Structure formats: C-alpha cells, structure tokens
Image (cartoon, helix red, strand yellow):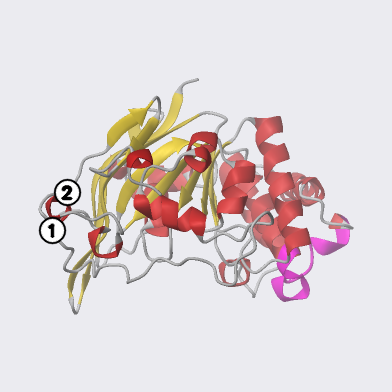
Amino acid sequence: MSVLLELRQLAVSFATDDGTVRAVDGIDLSLERGRTLGLVGESGCGKSVTSLAVMGLLPPENSMVKGEVRFEGRDLLTLGADTLRDMRGARLAMIFQEPMTSLNPAYTVGDQIIEAIQRHQGLSAADARARAIEMLRTVRISSPEKRIDDYPHKLSGGMRQRAMIAMALACGPELLIADEPTTALDVTIQAQILDLMRGLRRDTGTAIILITHDLGVVAEMADDVAVMYAGQIVERAPVRALFARPEHPYTVGLLGSIPRLDEKRERLPSIEGRVPDMSRPPDGCRFAARCPFVELACRAETPPLVEVAPGHLTRCRRAPLAQVLP
C-alpha cells in the first residue's frame, strides 16, 4: 500500500506571555491508504495540535509550524491558502472534538453539509440537498428528510456527531482525522459511531487518524498506534504488538491504568507526577521525572526512536523493557 500522509520533523510552537511553548517537537509519522492510525496520549501531549497542523487550521497570529506535512508527496505547508482550502473538505477532512461547538448554531445541519458539497463538487442546490440527505441516511440518522432542516440544538449528542461525520465524508475524502469522535457519548452511541467509521473505511478505503485517550477504542479500531508524550512520539507499533508488549514506560503506565475484568483491584495504578512545562522542556527524556526505571543517563540526553521489533519503535534507552519489568 502506498503512503498517503507523511509527517517529517513536524514541529509546532506557540508564542505566549510565558514564552514559546513547543507543543509538537519534531515528530515523524506516516499513514498508508485505507489504514487507521491511533494517536494516543493524555491531554496536552500534542495530539490535536498535530491534527490542526495537518489541516492548516492553526491560528497564524501566534503559531509557528516547521517541518513537512506531505499528502500524496505534496507538502501542504508550502501551499497557498486558496489551494489548501480547495483540498480541505474535499480530499482531507476532520471530525472535531465537540460537535456542539463545531456546528454553527445559526444554520441548519443541512445548510452546513450542503455548503461543503456545493463548494467542492459544484452541484446545484437541489442535487446538493439530495446528496446531504443521502449522507445523513448513510450515517444512520432516522428521517433524514426531516432532520436536514433541524438546527444543531435539536439533535442529541450522538446525532450531532453523526452529522459531523456526514459533513466530513460528503465529498469522499481520502484522509479523515477524527479528534475524540466518541467524547461525552454513552457507550451504546460510542459503539454505533465506531461501527459506522469502521464500515465507511471498509466501503470507501478512507484512511483515518483516530485521536483519542481511550485505549479501548484504539484496540478496536486502529491498525497501528503512535503514543505521544510532551510533544514527542515515544512509541509506535502495530496495535497488537503494542498491547501485547509495550516498550516505553509511559505506554506501560497507560495500559496499567485501564480497568480489567479479569483483575480485581481496590485502586488502579496511576502515573505519578505531571507533564513537563513545554515552555521550558527538560533536558534528556521528557518522561524521566515520572519514570520508575529512570537512570542518570536518562536526564542527560534525549533518547532516539529505536526499533526493538519489526515495525515497533520506542524512545527509551532501557528497551526492551522485558528485562526490567517485574
């Protein structure tokens, strides 16, 4: 399979009153056509900023983006605003984290989907409306002929999320970025949304970047996983390999904090400490202050990503961790 998206040393920083914050610090990622990449990590690690950099939606007033974002070999960071606007929505699309704040409350759901269809496909108003109804039906919204004229506040959280997915997929994008697509939804609606995304990928071949902190969702949906911490990729592996044998202490901590039906614990393990201040990032390994396996050398230099198994990379000088884990 050919590579659809490739990030090369992508770095994003923001100018703030407290100094320059390095939100994303030189990451390399690639995504092949028709595959799903899970991008995981706790809040503030740089997941959403990475996605906004790919889409070209970072605020120009205080952000600086370096590196390359190659889509089909073309660096999106070098394109003009009009060219990128033509691609955004048509060839690469995004489901934002909170549909209630992403949908415009002053326009009906149908108007917002129709606008995207007419902008990118040049259909007449009647044909665009028919296409929008078809997309609402595709995402399993009941009575789409009526719902198309509803305002966002009339829809439930799950239906708003489905409407966002319909809008994102209306023009048949080759890349879909889903930023926490199941946040604040009950487990039944979560399962329906994930099943919908899985079916759409199967039917259309759309590649997906799934941004989440829910490792259960990643296990169900992703082919590959990239774990972010403090603006860096600290581990990347096929999903089965990562769950079977995590090689970075941060990944071990994330997996250990998940409740399991086969284990009875009075209290779940937690990762002690806090994420470093990215306006003054520490020397050496960014996880050193919270790592149970830290050594003096860990604080002296930043470890590179090393391959510990085919397709399995980790940013830890103690890898493989099997030799130190209890």
Q: Which residues are magenta?
A: 145-158
> Farthest residue in the left direction?
300
Answer with the quarter of the image where residue 7 lies: top left
Amino acid type at circle 1 is: Asp
Q: How many marks?
A: 2
Instruction: Identify the disc placed on residue 302.
Output: 2
Q: Regarding mark 1 in the picture, which secondary structure is present there?
A: loop
Q: Is residue 304 inside the magenta stretch? A: no
Q: Nearer the viewer, residue 115 or 279?
A: 279
Residue 104 can be seen in this image: yes
Provide the secondary structure element on which disc 2 rests.
loop
Q: Is residue 325 left or right of residue 255?
A: left
Q: Which mark is residue 265?
A: none
Q: Which residue is denoted by mark 1 in the rendering?
A: 283
The one of 265 and 154 positioned closer to us in this rendering: 265
The answer to whether residue 70 is visible is no
Q: Is residue 278 left or right of residue 194?
A: left
Residue 13 x %, y % = 23, 60
